Image: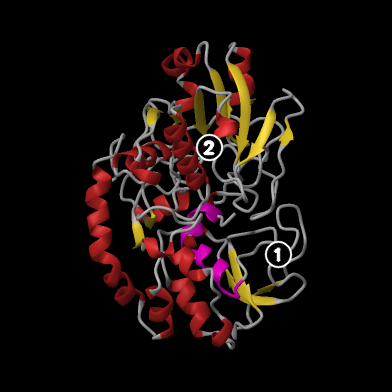
Amino acid sequence: MIQPILILGALVLGLNSCSPKQNPATTSEQNTPVTETATAPETPAAKPLVLGAEQMDRYLKQLEGKRVGMVVNQTSVIGKTHLVDTLISRGVQVTTIFAPEHGFRGEADAGAHIKDAKDTKTGLPIISLYGSNKKPSKDQMKNLDVLVFDIQDVGTRFYTYISTMHYAMEACAENGKKMLVLDRPNPNGHYVDGPVLDMAHKSFVGMHPIPIVHGLTVGELAEMINGEKWLEGERSCDLTVIKMDNYDHTMAYELPVRPSPNLPNTQSIALYPSICFFEGTNVSVGRGTPTPFQVIGSPFYQKKDYSFTPVSMPGATDPPHKGVKCYGMDLTDASHAQPFTLKYLLEMYNNSSNKEKFFNNFFEKLAGTSELRKQVIAGKTEAEIKASWEPELSDYKVLRKNYLLYPDFE
């Protein structure tokens, strides 16, 4: 996936005050936990965060006697137990598991083909919603009444789980089925930034006219998609969002399970909005190293004081520049976990010995605009570039307020 908790390091640097850090639920034993690298100061205890999935008294009755499909992955846990297992133990008739990019267990490489399969524990069919079958088909929807979405997002436009949610909503709207979104925190939900997507560049890594850092939970975004008629044919989905208790957009939150193979810790998730652009360039984001999305480098970067060599490893079997020494920047220190910035992109471009091949045709899809590449090549400063997208960003911020389900950071 284009990789890609409220980011703790970012909070320390970017917020004057915040709500207390919540203790996350313990992940299931088969899942790899997020490793914390940036920490927030301890604050007095507050009411514990209660996730949407944990609010079973609010949604179990809606599932009684219904055939239930589930859009879930390795992050869909309550305590040590996967939500699928929890619902089955409560007598819910789960008929189908739909898996996003990286698969049901979250182990596949970014962009890898995910095959349909069966869950060895429950025997349930697993249908991939990545690749050629991004939207549940009419045939796949006919044996269910309700579709439940419960996946941890990281709050950026190009992270494809929200695109999977869009298509799930669309399938429900087209087939007269109910959609239930169990809300989870947005680890980058404490700010909004970046260019708003020009729909001429719409793709699976950018489906909505929202900025790169959209500042919404998946539940809030689902409400926006529905309210703004962004589904095909301007349809509306029969949508219910199960809200969290005791959440707000300034809250520090540690993800109990890594959301995808190459986002292993809070540092990588904090940096992800700023360095995912490099997936559309000849610069490595550290796939095939122990610190993905925490280092950047290229054989063409002219400063030689830091280097790494990507290798094949689980979650990155064929990383860019595999076996080639890349020179660049080590961003593992918590001081780099700041809100969205263009400084790394400008630095790597300005000091590249191969500017002609720096960008590839994927860059515009990630940026969501054709202007950013032109601005970088023209030598514009970060301040000049950000000023160019401010009018549309300001309009989005006004729109966003209409769909907030929780207290905001402003």
Residue 250 appears anywhere in the view:
no
Q: Is residue 30 left or right of residue 92?
A: right
Between 390 and 27, the one lying in front of the other is 390
The residue singled out by tag 2 in the image is 151
Q: Position of residue 366 (x, y in %)?
A: 48, 63
Q: Is residue 277 above or below residue 203?
A: below
Q: Which residues are magenta?
A: 267-283
Q: Is residue 42 above or below residue 199?
A: above
Residue 77 appears anywhere in the view:
yes
Q: Earlier in the sequence, mark 2 or mark 1?
A: 2
The residue singled out by tag 1 in the image is 319
Q: Position of residue 73 (x, y in %)?
A: 61, 37
Q: Label 2 crowding class (10 Å Cα cut-off): few <14, some 14-19, many 20+?
A: many
Q: Position of residue 181 (x, y in %)?
A: 45, 31
Between 377 and 119, the one lying in front of the other is 119
Q: Secondary structure at mark 1?
A: loop
Q: Is residue 10 left or right of residue 360?
A: left
Residue 409 is labelled as: none
Q: Position of residue 214 (x, y in %)?
A: 37, 51
Between 246 and 229, the one lying in front of the other is 229
Residue found 69% across the figure and 25% down from its top: 124
Residue found 66% across the figure and 42% down from its top: 103
Q: Is residue 276 magenta?
A: yes
- Which amino acid type corresponds to the residue marked 1 in the rendered image? Pro
Q: Is residue 88 left or right of residue 247?
A: right
- Locate the N terminus by quadrant: bottom right
Q: Is residue 85 above or below residue 302?
A: above
From mark 2 to mark 1, how far is it between C-alphas?
A: 25 Å
